[in-house]
Amino acid sequence: MSNVKYILGHFEDPDDMMHGIDKLQENNIGIYDVYTPMPIHGIEDKLGYKRSRLPIAAFCFGLTGTITAISMIYYMLVYDWPMNIGGKPSLAMPDFVPITFELTVLFGAYGMMFTFFYANHFFPGRAPRVMDFRATDDRFVIAIDAKSNPYPDKIEDLLKEAGAVEVKHNERKYVSYE
Amino acid sequence: MGTHNQHTHNFTQQYEFSGKAKTWSLIAIVIGIVAIAYGFLLDPAENHVERTFANLLLMSYYFTCVCAAGAFFLALQYVSQAGWSAGLLRIPQAFAKVLPIAAVILIIICLSGLLTHNLYHHWNGEGLTVKGSPEYDPAIANKAAFLNVPFFTIRQVVFLGIYSIFAIALARFSNNEDLEGGLKNYKKSFKISAIFLVIFGFTTPIWAFDTIMSLEAHWFSTMFGWYNFAAMWVSGLCVITVTAILLKKAGYMNWLNDSHFHDLGKLVFAFSIFWTYVWFAQFLLIWYANMPEETVYFYKRWEPEYKLWFWVNIVINFVAPVLILMTRDAKRRTNTLLGVCILLLMGHWLDYYLMIMPGTVEEHPGFGVIEIGTALGFAGLFSFLMLGQLSRKPLVPKNHPFLEESLHHSI
């Protein structure tokens, strides 16, 4: 059993899986991650996940967009080539608002998207890797790091007790769709 | 999912309308009546009758808008088949049930203002549309086919009548659902909601053109209808949120959790930005095109009497909610949300003030007994009627098909 890296408990029912998480936590067994085919309410709190930092990234990208827009318009319409448009001053702030708004949204949206892709290892040519194929289909999977948690038999017993239909011992972390 | 279906909520819980809420509502109504009587009879200012009428129009329009927003909220939830809101639907239903009364008050005030020439005198005056008369105004004469007293009255009555019928029907279907169960009433609500939203969407701009924009009949803006819709929807959402928070604080509706308030907060936040968006869309085009017949609207609001209010309006209705409600935690803290909603309700009073006053009392606006008293009076009338309606039925539509989803709402 020494080659086993991860123990995966398969559940067919999300309530059984939540029960399984409780059982493992009661016995101080660290859970590496949980994979479900659909979102489960309250699971982040249960697993103690921290709040996503994506909004901070979004704010920074948005601010970059605002600054880019204002400096671009300022350079073009006030510094480099001031024009008389309807007798209004060159630095006419109401004019700048729509473009500033649009660039803020554009930078914020694209920045968030690329940050998300980067954090989740999504980019062209990369085959998606998952810990178990059926976690994207019909099984609710709890993954436990076998190296840091001794007594694999006890873990298997706890999972079975909670209603696991299958317990897998994987020697590789990921399987690839390739 | 067997384990999720246990809850300890009391579905027969009914709001008991008594004690402080009732006393304060009645006191506010009395203050309102006294202030209106003072405005009509005693106020020493020269334009006191006109100013009182302008305030009555402001508050009755605000009142009707909030009630109509309740009906709109209901229709929107049914059409989108929303689950999260099922537990709080009785609140907008109470608003919707008050809509007919609000509509009658608004129509009475509009018509009496019209007939006594205290409101709408820009298009309703002696000889304005008669060729050869010294008062003849070609711009108004060209609009006379639309802006005349009989057609104006018909539009007000028809629009508000239709909204009221749909509002009452939605509340009735929900009550039938309580008694009969099953999906029949939900499906009916879905159908009439879809019809209502189409009618409401096409007629509210015209209604706003009539009731508010025609105060300055020479000026026009096609954005004005949406601008008023945005103000109506934000203020309606704020009143729904305030009512929900206060009910929860008073020990009712314990099934409402942080996530419900978070969602309401998101709606208030988003539609404050939407309000600013349409406000600015109207402003930018007028400012950019710089045509005298259009800029006159902002010119009047840029005079010393209104300039300060003009800026305060933007700060309260845009800057404040954006900065305060930006974070997730702020929307989940009910005290913060309550404060912002009350601030926004005052902000939208100011917004209506800026729409109405320059077209009625022009350069002699005031802020005193009449303004505060009328506002308090209508707020009291609203809470008295709305809480009275709320107390008649259980606080939860117990056979709503998505109720279970609402009880476990979590975001």
Image (cartoon, grey):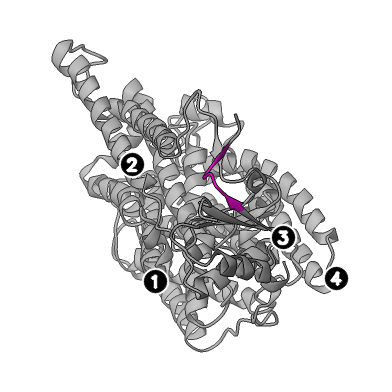
Chain under label 1? B
- Disc 4 residue type (three-letter): Glu
Return the residue found at the far left. Answer: A79
Q: Tell me how far mark 3 sits from mark 2, CA to CA.
A: 40 Å
Q: Which residue is mark 3?
A: A165
Q: Are marks 1 and 4 on the same chain?
A: yes
Q: Secondary structure at mark 2?
A: helix
Whichever of callouts 3 and 2 sits on the residue coming sooner in the sequence is 2
Q: Secondary structure at mark 1?
A: helix
Chain under label 4? B
Q: Which residue is mark 2?
A: A57
Q: Are marks 4 and 3 on the same chain?
A: no
Q: Between B181 and A39, which is closer to the camera in this rendering?
A: A39
The label number, if any, that marks residue B180 in the structure image: 4
Q: Between B110 and B299, which is closer to the camera in this rendering?
A: B299
Q: What x and y, as percent, mark residue B236?
A: 52, 57
**Where on the picture, by quarter, is residue B69?**
bottom right
Q: Tell me how far mark 1 sits from mark 2, CA to CA.
A: 53 Å
Q: Tell me how far mark 3 sits from mark 1, CA to CA.
A: 74 Å
- Disc 3 residue type (three-letter): Val
Q: Are circles 1 and 2 on residues that touch, CB within 8 Å? A: no
Q: Which residue is mark 1?
A: B35
Q: Nearer the viewer, mark 1 or mark 4?
A: 4
The answer to whether residue B278 is magenta is: no
Image quadrant in which the N terminus of chain A is located: bottom right
* Magenta-drawn segment: A169-175
Q: Mark 1 packing: few (<14 Cα in 10 Å), some, or many (20+)?
A: many
Q: Between B132 and B209, which is closer to the camera in this rendering?
A: B209
Q: Nearer the viewer, mark 3 or mark 1?
A: 3
Chain under label 2? A
